[in-house]
Image (tube, rainbow, N blue to C red):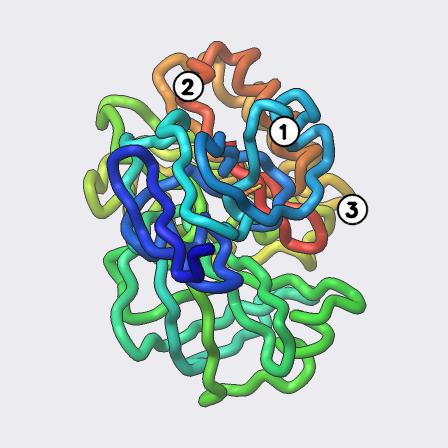
């Protein structure tokens, strides 16, 4: 019987996998890209078929990995630890998106700023630069635990010596109530892994406009995407819709107004779903339908709670966007991410 590290092979590229190391982690650290999103076993993006070898794997909900798929040898790479050398089918391996090697990252808290009710903008100064693509996330390690939480970068990849996160307090949450909102201070060390995720800005046809639909702190990756797109083309047409419940939940308002003032193609529309004010009310998808007669010549990125993302996708389809140009990432209150 062989001992770890085991060799895991895609049928073309092979990487070592240490004891207790998940296959997805081993592939990404080894520079072999497997599509991935939540890293929590909840989205199914990292599904692979084992063609030889054995793994230990956690039970997956039928909605993520059906019994029929399991019978055919499919597992979730983010939840599976090899117990022998393993070969997986190369099916599902995506070579079209920009990929960066996963690694451990260390840094120090550089700034903490309360930007809205129960919402902080936290800047981490990195010990070493990190390559990532706009839209991706890192997993912050919660000190004193084995637990991590995903947070998307809000700064563009060109600023590779720091990371900006938008963090909303989750009552009772171990990352927020137990750490970030309970004494995290400038100068504290922070460790994390990354970059993770398939919710990536791809510099597609520059003639296409961008629609960015955000709910709550789903604004973070879209801020990174807008900045990255404007670095490539300062005249890019970008429509940003930020949905929150109350005015006190809005943040980065001045940032977006300044961006729109400097870039004639940028339109920023905050929308409140509850509570009165003089600005737009209702849901971001409805605002988009009211404003844009057609989205045929747009790419769209959506990030926020699942219901907001689903409604936004429906609104975009009503406006005739090509489905292949819709990129979405949902998050639940426990910050599990699901990109499609
Ligand atoms: S289930 Fe593995 S990345 Fe989501």
* Residue identifier under label 1: 70
Q: Residue at x 47, y 79 (%)?
A: 190
Taking the spot 49% from the left edge, 87% from the top edge, the residue there is 188
What label does residue 275 carry, if any? 3
Q: Residue at x 59, y 80 (%)?
A: 143
Mark 2 packing: few (<14 Cα in 10 Å), some, or many (20+)?
few
**Quick one: label 1 or label 3, which is nearer the N terminus?**
1
Q: CA distance from mark 1 to mark 3?
A: 47 Å
Query: Would you identify the image quadrant in which residue 281 lies?
Result: top right
* Residue furthest to the left: 232
Select label 1 or label 2 by which is in front.
Answer: 1
Q: Nearer the viewer, residue 38 or 172?
A: 38
Residue ID for mark 2? 324
Circle 1 Cα neighbour tier, 10 Å, few/some/many (<14 / 14–19 / ≥20): some
Residue at 34% x, 31% y: name it: 94
Q: Are marks 1 and 3 in contact (CB under 8 Å)?
A: no
Using the rendered view, name the quadrant where residue 65 is placed.
top right
Under circle 3, the secondary element is: loop
Q: Position of residue 230 (x, y in %)?
A: 26, 44
- Which of label 2 and label 3 is nearer to you? 2
- Can you tell which of label 1 and label 3 is closer to the viewer? 1
Q: Where residue 139 sits: x, y (%)?
A: 51, 62
């Amino acid at each position: 019987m062989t001992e770890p590290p085991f060799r895991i092979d895609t049928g073309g590229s092979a990487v070592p996998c240490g004891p207790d190391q998940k296959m997805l982690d081993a592939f990404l650290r080894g520079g072999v890209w497997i599509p991935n999103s939540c890293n929590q076993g909840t989205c199914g993006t990292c599904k692979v078929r084992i063609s030889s070898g054995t793994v230990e794997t956690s039970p997956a909900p039928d909605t993520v990995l059906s019994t029929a798929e399991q019978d055919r040898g499919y597992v979730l790479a983010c939840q599976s630890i090899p117990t022998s050398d393993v070969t997986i089918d190369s099916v599902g391996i995506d070579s079209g998106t920009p990929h960066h090697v996963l690694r451990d990252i260390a840094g120090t808290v550089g700034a903490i700023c309360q930007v809205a009710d129960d919402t902080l903008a936290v800047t981490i100064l990195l010990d070493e630069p990190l390559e990532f693509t706009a839209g991706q996330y890192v997993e912050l390690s919660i000190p004193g635990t084995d637990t991590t939480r995903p947070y998307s970068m809000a700064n563009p990849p060109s600023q590779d010596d720091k990371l900006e996160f938008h963090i909303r307090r989750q009552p009772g949450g171990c990352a927020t109530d137990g750490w970030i909102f309970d004494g995290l201070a400038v100068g504290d060390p922070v460790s994390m892994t990354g970059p993770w995720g398939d919710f990536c800005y791809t510099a597609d046809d520059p003639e296409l406009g961008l629609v960015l639909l955000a709910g709550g702190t789903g604004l973070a990756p879209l801020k990174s995407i807008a900045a990255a797109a404007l670095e490539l083309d300062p005249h890019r047409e970008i429509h940003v819709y930020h949905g929150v419940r109350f005015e006190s939940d809005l943040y980065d308002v001045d940032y977006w107004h300044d961006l729109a003032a400097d870039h004639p193609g940028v339109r920023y529309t905050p929308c409140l779903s509850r509570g009165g004010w003089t600005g737009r009310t209702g849901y971001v998808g409805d605002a988009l339908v009211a404003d844009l007669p057609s989205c045929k010549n747009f790419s769209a990125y959506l990030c926020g709670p699942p219901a907001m993302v689903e409604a936004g996708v429906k609104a975009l389809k009503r406006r005739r966007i090509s489905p292949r140009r819709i990129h979405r990432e949902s998050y639940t209150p426990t910050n599990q991410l699901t990109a499609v």
